[in-house]
Image: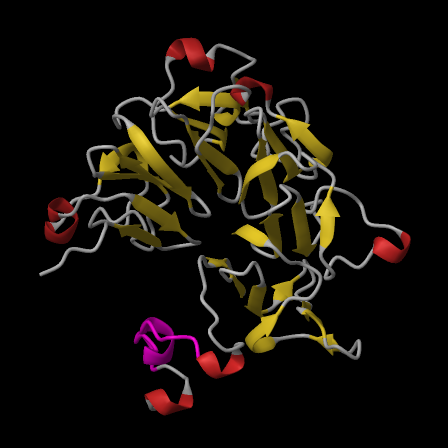
């Protein structure tokens, strides 16, 4: 098939999917200016400079059913194939996306959420008139006191103005930050819970993968926690850490499986930014370098290998070496790093 069909030859990239292309402005209000973009598996969202939110794509539940939202007349939208204004939210300053849910922070420092809520990603069970999770609802955490939001695939985070960090949603491997409920496949936090070991640390960046999470402090320390059977956390735990039952939980094969509380990552230097993919992690240091660890089967670590990596290694290459890297982003099996543009 040719590229015009939107299909791909075996082993070849589809140009329609692999070439960056501007989102058509004909679907947007005049003079719309986007200030951020948030995306995961099958959905994308972008807030404007006036606090409105546009979205497109779909949410998929555990049965594979697809739903996005509603038309003005109440008709269900299964797939939104062009940017559409999200009704029910306004004055939005930040977005964060999980696999199939969205968080939005508004100018009143409140958090809104919509999408799939099967793992309580939206912070509470929905009942009665409020049971439809496709309609944005305010999340009952840090009311008028939130300053930052973030999301893993099926768990969510918020930071309040007192530098408390809150987590909710799926917590099977402690990814949402609660050590007491970690260790079962069905562990879901019933409401946002404070991650006490991160309280007061002034966390500046936090992100989550499928079953692990990472956070950065103003002192450039990076903390990681959650599933540790795959190199996602980026370092080898000491014998003392492994023998600490409050730090590490072992699986039925007597292998270390869960880092129960945030642990500092050594060896990568002073960290300014982090990002979590499904099963890998990226770190950006203050001297402009990138490090990566975790699953590497699709080349997502950028280390010129498809091997998994347990101890974080520096991402090298001519372009990366010449740039002063400042940001990273990670998806299921891919990664992105960026640096300020240079005029040449």
Q: Residue at x 23, y 51 (%)?
A: 340
Using the image as rendered, state which of residue 63 and residue 60 is in the foreground. 60
- Which residue is situated farthest in the right direction here? 128
| The C terminus: image quadrant | bottom left
Q: Residue at x 14, y 53 (%)?
A: 319
Q: Which residues are magenta?
A: 9-24
Q: Position of residue 167 (x, y in %)?
A: 62, 34
Vertical relation: 307 (above or below) 342: above
Q: Residue at x 50, y 36 (%)?
A: 212
Left or right: where does residue 332 sit relative to residue 92? left
Left or right: where does residue 242 sit relative to residue 83? left
Q: Magenta region's main secondary structure?
A: loop
Q: Can residue 98 be spotted in the picture?
A: no
Q: How many marks?
A: 0
Vertical relation: 45 (above or below) 10: above
Determine if the magenta segment contains residue 22. yes
Q: Quadrant of residue 214?
A: top left
Q: Position of residue 285 (x, y in %)?
A: 26, 34
């Amino acid at each position: 098939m040719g590229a015009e069909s939107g299909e791909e030859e075996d082993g070849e990239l589809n140009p329609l999917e692999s070439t960056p292309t501007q989102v058509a402005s004909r679907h947007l209000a005049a003079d719309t200016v986007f200030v951020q973009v948030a995306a995961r598996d099958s959905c994308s969202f972008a807030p404007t400079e006036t606090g409105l939110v546009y979205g497109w794509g779909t949410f998929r539940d555990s049965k594979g059913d697809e739903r996005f939202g509603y038309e003005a007349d109440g008709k269900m939208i299964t797939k939104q194939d062009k940017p559409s204004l999200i009704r029910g939210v306004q004055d939005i300053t930040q977005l964060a996306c999980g696999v199939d849910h969205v968080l939005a922070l508004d100018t009143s420092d409140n958090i809104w959420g919509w999408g799939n809520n099967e793992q309580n990603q939206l912070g509470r069970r929905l009942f009665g008139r409020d049971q439809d999770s496709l309609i944005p609802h305010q999340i009952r955490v840090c009311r008028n006191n939130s300053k930052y939001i973030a999301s893993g695939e099926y768990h969510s985070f918020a930071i309040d103005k007192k530098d408390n960090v809150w987590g909710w949603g799926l917590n099977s491997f402690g990814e949402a930050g609660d050590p007491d409920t970690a260790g079962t496949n069905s562990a879901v936090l019933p409401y946002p819970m404070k991650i006490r070991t991160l309280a007061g640390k002034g966390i500046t960046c936090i992100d989550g993968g499928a079953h692990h999470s990472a956070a950065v402090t103003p002192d450039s320390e990076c903390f990681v926690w959650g599933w540790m059977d795959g190199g996602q956390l980026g370092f080898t735990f000491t014998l003392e850490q492994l023998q600490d039952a409050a730090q590490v939980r072992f699986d039925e094969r007597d292998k270390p499986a869960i880092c129960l509380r945030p642990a500092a990552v050594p060896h990568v230097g002073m960290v300014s930014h982090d990002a979590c993919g499904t099963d890998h992690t990226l770190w950006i240091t203050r001297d402009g370098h990138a490090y990566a660890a975790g699953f590497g089967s699709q080349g997502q670590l950028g280390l010129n290998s498809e091997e998994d990596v347990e101890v974080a290694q520096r991402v090298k290459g001519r372009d990366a070496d010449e740039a002063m890297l400042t940001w990273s982003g990670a998806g299921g099996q891919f990664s992105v790093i960026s640096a300020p543009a240079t005029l040449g």
